[in-house]
Amino acid sequence: MCKRGLRIYLFLLIALFVGCSAEPVEVAPEIIPTATIELVAEELQPTALPTSTSLPVIPTFAPGRETAVTPTTPPAETPIPQPPTQLRDCPTVLPADALPLLSSGSLLYITGQTDETNLYFFAMKEHSDVLAFSADSLIPVPIYTIPSNLIRVTISPDGTKLLRFERAEERPDNYLYHAVVYDLVTKEETYSDQLLPQISGNWLPDGRIVSSIVNLERQVGVGEHHEFFILDMATQITETVSLDLDLPHYTYYEEPLYQGIASVDPSVQKVLYTTGGFNVVLRDLTTETNIWHYDGTYGLYPFPEWSSDGSKVFFSIPIEEGEHSYYKIFRLTRDGQEEKLPLQPYPGLDTEEVRYLNFSLDEQYIHYALQESFMTGAGYVLDIPGAWIGEICSGDGEFIEGQWIADGQFVYTVLLKNGGQSLHLLDVPTWTSQKLAQLPPGEGFVVYGWTPLELTSP
């Protein structure tokens, strides 16, 4: 049915390295946070803060908790009109002298030299500047200088801090690194006392940082094992976390093709994973029972995305219905109820693989991109209540990737016909786009995301 093979395995390698930013090739792989947690230290007590959109979040978990978390959004079917989904034309493009389309806050990004064979890896010079577009100006300003070419940066859940990693010392077989937090308000840096073996890490909802100690360990038929440091940069207190998932009939293959995924909700009580090679199961970890399953034709791909409150999970499965085969998008509640979406299949999903899939912060829109080449492919936005879909297209070049920011707005990059890149902002409710910046051949953008702060110069 859909094209598979080496590109699927290569895509997952990119996902381990990239998240929502990019690094030089020497970067150690970034693990995907999915597991049940047993704390070696005292019980963790998170503070509710907005969830960052930059990277997946390792959940905080209280051991021995048996009662399921009540979703902030009740798991109920959403009434959706079911005529054939309307296809919109390309977005309207604002003229160059139009006012900024960004509704509020600032968009953060960095530029660098792209690898000719891989748009997601960048050759960066020392002292690269993080740039910001604010809602009141289309002129980018430098707001922070990174004193190394390790440019992986993530924005804190409240949007006020940046996290990066810096090499501390060399060991015979490896390097150790500091976690470094830059406060966008006070303009001060804080270095971790704890040296870390990885140059990757995520923000927790309560503002702490989690970083892997060892690489993910998977075992077919058994489950997964992870180990992490959790850092409180304010107090410099470090906790060690052991993560184990008991997954009956878990299937995971690395060769000849990548296959097999386990994705855990933010409360660490539900897990969506692959069994028997091709089937997908939603399992309740507290009752040790399966509450939903699908007998698929190729398992689960790409990686699922949970809503921030854990009430829903979005994913796609390649399926066969009679003589038709296509990638079907699912929206499943944590209780195993499949919510209705506008009539499928959507454009391109009967001929191409899904390169990646995500949803807007208010869950009104779904974005998916096709795997037309290793790094590019058409990008679409589906309006769920309105039952319409539109391609994020233009005559300038090929869609690379994008991410949601605030208020139904979407930022994305385009590979130009001359080999350069352009950066765009799309306002989905008005279906209007605006070009923010353009780079010459051989250069590209790494978009870090959005902050509610309207930033000017340092």
Image (cartoon, rainbow, N blue to C red):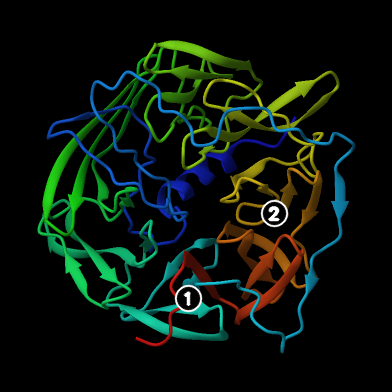
Q: Report x, y in % for residue 72.
A: 49, 36
Q: Nearer the viewer, residue 217 or 393?
A: 393
Amino acid at the residue labelled 1: Thr
Q: Secondary structure at mark 2?
A: loop
Looking at the rendered image, the quarter that the C terminus falls into is bottom left
Q: Nearer the viewer, residue 368 or 256?
A: 368
Q: Quadrant of residue 265?
A: top left
Q: Report x, y in % for residue 12.
A: 49, 43
The Cα atoms of the two marked residues, 1 and 2, are separated by 22 Å
Tell whether 445 sits left or right of 344: left
Residue drawn at x 21%, y 72% is 189
Tell whether 95 sits left or right of 364: right
Tell whether 36 sits left or right of 372: left
Looking at marks 1 and 2 on the same chain, the residue that comes earlier in the sequence is marked by 1
Q: Quadrant of residue 164?
A: bottom left
Mark 2: few, some, or many residues within 10 Å (few <14, many ≥20)? many
Q: Report x, y in % for residue 28.
A: 31, 52
Mark 1: few, some, or many residues within 10 Å (few <14, many ≥20)? some
- Above or below 344: residue 52: below
Residue drawn at x 30%, y 51% is 201
Q: Which mark is residue 201?
A: none
Residue drawn at x 76%, y 84% is 95
Tell whether 13 sits left or right of 227: right
Amino acid at the residue labelled 2: Gly
Looking at the rendered image, the quarter that the N terminus falls into is top right
- Above or below 62: residue 47: below
Q: Report x, y in % for residue 62.
A: 25, 30
According to the image, label 1 marks what residue? 111
According to the image, label 2 marks what residue? 377
